[in-house]
Amino acid sequence: MPLLKSCWHEARSLSLMLLVKAYHRAALRGDEKTQKRIYDFYLKHTRFINNWDLVDLSAEHIVGAWLHSRDRSPRIKLATSRSLWERRIAILATFHYIKKGEYAETLRIAKCLLKDDKDLI
């Protein structure tokens, strides 16, 4: 998706909104193959998801949703990443669980990020 690689913030934002919409539509159809492709694409392109609002509008809806009933260990890898944005993706993805009344995963990730020196975490 060329929009995600754009130098324009607004284009990247639109790209992520479209990905979230596509993920949601695939989920409604029970199309796990498309959901997985979107999740994998998202994680392969985190270098372009490089602002707080880009993470906030997408992480819970793609990463959080995909990992909800699966192995959640990929989020630990994100939480320990050198990338501020990947660390933010890790914690923001847990909003998906919080909205379902599940807090343990958020606390587990927060513990990994407790001493992070970046204010966006």
Image (spheres, rainbow, N blue to C red):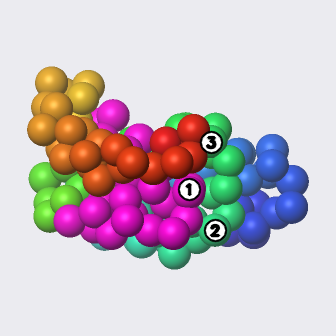
Please, what is the dominant secondary structure of the magenta stretch?
helix
**Nearer the N terminus, badge 1 or badge 2?**
2
Three-letter code, disc 1:
Trp
Quadrant of res 105: top left
Q: Position of residue 116 (x, y in %)?
A: 45, 50
Residue at disc 1, secondary structure: helix
Numbered label attached to residue 47: 2
Quadrant of res 119: top right
Q: Distance between the residues labelled 1 and 2?
A: 8 Å
Residue at disc 3, secondary structure: helix
**Nearer the N terminus, badge 2 or badge 3?**
2
Q: Where is residue 94 in the image (x, y as percent from the top left)?
A: 30, 41
On screen, 46 above or below 99?
below
Dots 1, 2 in contact, CB < 8 A: yes
Q: Position of residue 37 (x, y in %)?
A: 41, 71
Q: Circle 3 sits on which residue? A: 52
Three-letter code, disc 2:
Arg
**Closer mark to the observer between disc 1 and disc 2:** 1
User: Which residues fall within the magenta stretch?
Assistant: 73-96
Q: How far apart are marks 3 and 1 (CA)?
A: 7 Å
Q: Position of residue 76 (x, y in %)?
A: 28, 63
Number of residues whose C-alpha sits closer than 10 Å to that of mark 2, classed few (under 14), some (14–19) or many (20 or more): some
Q: Is residue 64 magenta?
A: no
Q: How far apart are marks 2 and 3 (CA)?
A: 13 Å
Numbered label attached to residue 112: none
Q: Is residue 81 magenta?
A: yes
Q: Nearer the viewer, residue 73 or 37?
A: 73
**Nearer the N terminus, badge 3 or badge 1?**
3
Three-letter code, disc 3:
Trp
Residue at disc 2, secondary structure: helix
Q: Circle 1 sits on which residue? A: 85
